[in-house]
């Protein structure tokens, strides 16, 4: 586990060395993923590569979570694909800009703090679901350039490269930690493949069936290369209109939710690993600014990547420089070293991602489930399944809603009423002592516990051990007062909180509020204030 970040510590060369090396490792892992996500979204590979550079650099410098890696993301690419297929890349770039504006708004409104409301069961499901998504995504790498599954010698070579990569990543730290084991594994395995002339599938082979990575980067291998700011000068007539806005807006909202949720949850995960605390609102603002910039320059934008973030942190990259160095290294790869990177065997990167899966999946969650309630265990499994079947936003939102409903139902059962009778001056008085929360889920149970028809002429309801939490609770008390009013009986409310004073008007003269036993509350009777 990486050491916690302490900004007050003096400059340490070892820290920056670790950040630099881990950033290079991340950059190597980003290349094939950025290219793959570009193809998923239906845009040129450079659109994804430059998105990773722009978004990664801005969030690394200005974001609220040092050590977290942000780049083009598959979860966003799936949504972008439909927009590009139906309307074209120009609409995508506008959607990315709008996504950025919304994310800045989320940060300025300080809505990032609501990520703390995500239950641990949802977090466990999120982590496990993402680990499974990363795992499943690697299976597509077991296909050749024609899209056929590998067999025979090709499959054996791929499996041996994966095994060698995993072995180096696992064993090297036991010998030395001077170099990140993930980077060492990629370099050593690549050199072995080149030196022994092993016929392995490489990054260049996977970049595109129509050319090498280098040819794609310089715009020769795929139609419609990276345009930069020039896309703004080639917009069709009438592009800037309300019609365009209504087309793009739904996609922008979905992208905003997915990107923000994934980034904030990844931030929470990195917080736990590094024993530090990120700034969610600051991260949202930086992510929004990054996406606005990325969209303006004609790229697909992005959000935090849990896989690359785990690679970075596990390789010792816990500072801002790790993200900066990853973006710079990726830029060097795009501009200078593409011919070298395309010779990296894809099996080495698959092995690296398998290690990420092993490190990401919360293996202890199965033991944790034994100590969980059935509801929490269900929520964890539900989020995991929905993450794999649909996407992160759907899974997390559904998990939070189910967890909230379970919480509401369980607390609705805790509202109780204790009854007692007393005779004062020959007059029978019945007292109800309410215990437990009164809110939308418990309101019906609360009302059913009273019997206005058979109660004596005077009834007291004591709220000393209860609290009204929402308007539904207030309406429940209001409904009860009307029932006693209809029965011609007097009801006295004791220790009622200030927000319930509105009920006095509904019950008129039949309701008295006993304030002598609760001097902290101020209530209004007949237009006068008492204490």
Image (spheres, helix red, strand yellow):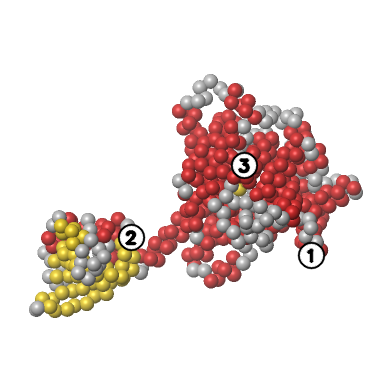
Q: Residues within 10 Å of mark 1 (few under 14, many from 20)?
A: few
Classify residue 175 as left or right of residue 397: right
* x, y percent for residue 289: 56, 39
Label 1 vs 3, first from the N-terminus: 3
Tag 1 residue? 174
Q: How many marks?
A: 3
Tag 2 residue? 469
Q: Quadrant of residue 42?
A: top right
Q: Is residue 79 above or below residue 306?
A: above
**Residue 141 in sight:** no
Q: Residue at x 62, y 67 (%)?
A: 364
* x, y percent for residue 366: 59, 67
Q: Residue at x 36, y 65 (%)?
A: 412
Label 2 vs 1, first from the N-terminus: 1
Mark 3: secondary structure: helix
Mark 1: secondary structure: helix
Question: Which mark, by number, is residue 58?
Answer: 3
Q: If the image is split into quadrants, where does the N terminus sit? A: bottom right
Q: Residue at x 48, y 31 (%)?
A: 245
Q: Residue at x 49, y 29 (%)?
A: 244
Question: Which mark, by number, is residue 416?
Answer: none
């Amino acid at each position: 586990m990486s050491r916690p970040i302490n900004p007050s510590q003096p400059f340490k060369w070892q820290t920056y060395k670790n950040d630099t090396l881990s950033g290079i490792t991340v950059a190597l892992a980003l290349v094939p993923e950025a290219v793959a996500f570009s193809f998923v979204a239906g845009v040129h590979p450079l659109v994804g590569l430059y998105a990773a550079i722009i978004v990664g650099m801005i969030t690394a410098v200005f974001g609220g979570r040092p050590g977290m890696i942000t780049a083009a993301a598959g979860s966003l690419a799936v949504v972008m694909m439909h927009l590009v297929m139906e309307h074209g890349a120009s609409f995508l770039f506008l959607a990315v800009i709008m996504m950025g504006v919304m994310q800045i708004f989320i940060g300025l409104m300080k809505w990032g703090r609501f990520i703390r409301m995500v239950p641990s069961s949802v977090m466990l499901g999120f982590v496990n679901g993402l680990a499974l998504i990363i795992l499943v995504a690697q299976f597509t790498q077991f296909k050749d350039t024609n899209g056929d599954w590998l067999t025979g010698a090709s499959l054996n070579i791929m499996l041996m490269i994966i095994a060698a990569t995993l072995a180096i990543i696992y064993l090297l730290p036991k010998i030395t930690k001077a170099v990140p084991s993930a980077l060492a594994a990629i370099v050593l395995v690549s050199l072995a493949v080149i030196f022994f002339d092993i016929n392995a599938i490489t990054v260049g082979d996977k970049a595109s069936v129509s050319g090498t990575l280098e040819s794609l980067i310089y715009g020769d291998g795929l139609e419609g290369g990276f345009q930069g700011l020039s896309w703004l000068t080639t917009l069709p007539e009438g592009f800037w209109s309300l019609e365009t806005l209504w087309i793009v807006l739904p996609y922008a909202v979905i992208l905003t939710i997915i990107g923000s949720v994934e980034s904030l949850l990844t931030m929470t995960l990195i917080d736990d690993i590094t024993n530090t605390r990120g700034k969610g609102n600051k991260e949202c603002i930086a992510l929004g600014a990054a996406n606005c910039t990325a969209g303006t320059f004609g790229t697909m934008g992005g959000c935090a990547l849990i896989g690359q973030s785990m690679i970075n942190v596990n390789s010792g990259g816990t500072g801002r420089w790790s993200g900066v160095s990853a973006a710079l290294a990726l830029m060097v790869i795009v501009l200078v070293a593409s011919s070298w990177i395309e010779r990296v065997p894809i099996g080495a990167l698959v092995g690296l991602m398998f290690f990420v899966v092993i490190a990401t999946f919360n293996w202890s969650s199965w033991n944790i489930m034994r100590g969980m309630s059935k509801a929490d265990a269900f929520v964890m499994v539900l989020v995991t399944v929905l993450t794999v079947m649909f996407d992160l936003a759907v899974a997390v939102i559904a998990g939070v809603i189910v967890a909230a409903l379970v919480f509401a139902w369980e607390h609705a059962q805790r509202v109780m009423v204790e009854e007692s009778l007393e005779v004062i001056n020959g007059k029978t008085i019945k007292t109800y002592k309410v215990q437990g929360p009164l809110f939308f889920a418990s309101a019906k149970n609360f009302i059913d516990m009273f019997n206005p028809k058979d109660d004596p002429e005077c009834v007291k309801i004591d709220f000393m051990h209860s609290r009204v939490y929402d308007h539904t609770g207030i309406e429940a008390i209001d409904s009860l007062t009307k029932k006693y009013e209809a029965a011609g009986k007097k009801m006295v409310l004791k220790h009622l909180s200030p927000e319930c004073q509105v009920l006095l008007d509904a019950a008129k003269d039949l309701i008295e509020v006993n304030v002598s036993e609760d001097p902290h509350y101020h209530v209004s009777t007949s237009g006068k204030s008492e204490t």
